Amino acid sequence: AQTVTQSQPEMSVQEAETVTLSCTYDTSESDYYLFWYKQPPSRQMILVIRQEAYKQQNATENRFSVNFQKAAKSFSLKISDSQLGDAAMYFCAYRRGTTRGGSNYKLTFGKGTLLTVNP
Amino acid sequence: DAGVTQSPTHLIKTRGQQVTLRCSPKSGHDTVSWYQQALGQGPQFIFQYYEEEERQRGNFPDRFSGHQFPNYSSELNVNALLLGDSALYLCASSLGGRDTEAFFGQGTRLTVV
């Protein structure tokens, strides 16, 4: 079974600074996706960034980037120029890349990291 | 595009009762997944519906059941509620297939007393 581990229950960063959130995962699959989701107090999960295991290049979305180390099964999220609106719970998630009778596989989430941004 | 909508937003039920939660997927999506998120935890997969059939199921008892309608909307039913069923229930929709992403609703906060 796939597992996702986030070892930092809480992190804090000063506004405009950079912070890195850690995530490790365990799988025997070679075809999979990794995701970072943000969950603000409004409760809605918002996709921040995703990485396909076959792609060696690290994904980047504006101020958000990942460091994907496939051999080490590590997938960290770097937030640059942190803003007050970045404060939220961040979840790392895994999904197998193959389909199952047409549907895609479930997401497996870590326990999350609560990010606080200090003004 | 309304995105994924869930109803109700909050619900209080008594132990032993039954509850039905509803989800309308994002326009064009045909796959609906349900997750349970206990306080301070990550979401746990309950089950997924595609083409009106349950395609995958997580480690949840048979008290949890669901349905998908021809318009792709879905219901989650929980029978014989336990205090431990108190959680945020999230619905996620996606397009069937490989290269797709899940969009989440705002969830239903269920409190069992």
Image: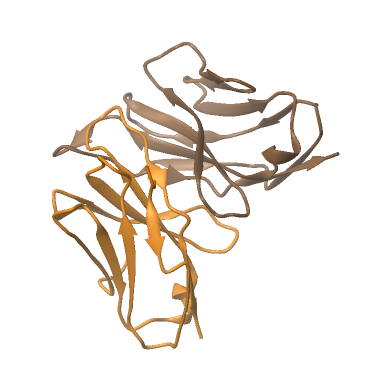
Colour scheme shown = by chain
Q: Quadrant of residue B29?
A: top left
* Relative side of A33 to B112, left or right: left
Q: Quadrant of the N terminus of chain A?
A: top left
Letter of the chain in brown: A
* Relative side of B95 to B86, left or right: left
Q: Quadrant of residue B57?
A: bottom left
In the rendered image, residue A54, in percent from the top left (x then y), is placed at 36, 16
Evaluate whether residue B59 shows in this view: no
Q: Nearer the viewer, residue B79 or B12?
A: B12
Q: Residue furthest right?
A: A119
In the rendered image, residue A43, in percent from the top left (x then y), is placed at 55, 54
Q: Nearer the viewer, residue B84 or A84?
A: A84
Q: Quadrant of the C terminus of chain A?
A: top right
B3 w.r.t. B15: above or below: above
Residue at the image point whose x is 38% and y is 50% from the top = B4
Letter of the chain in orange: B
Residue at the image point whose x is 42% and y is 81% from the top = B82
In the rendered image, residue A44, in percent from the top left (x then y), is placed at 51, 50
Q: How many marks?
A: 0
Residue at the image point whose x is 71% and y is 23% from the top = A80
* Relative side of A18 to A24, left or right: right
Q: Nearer the viewer, residue B8 or B42?
A: B8
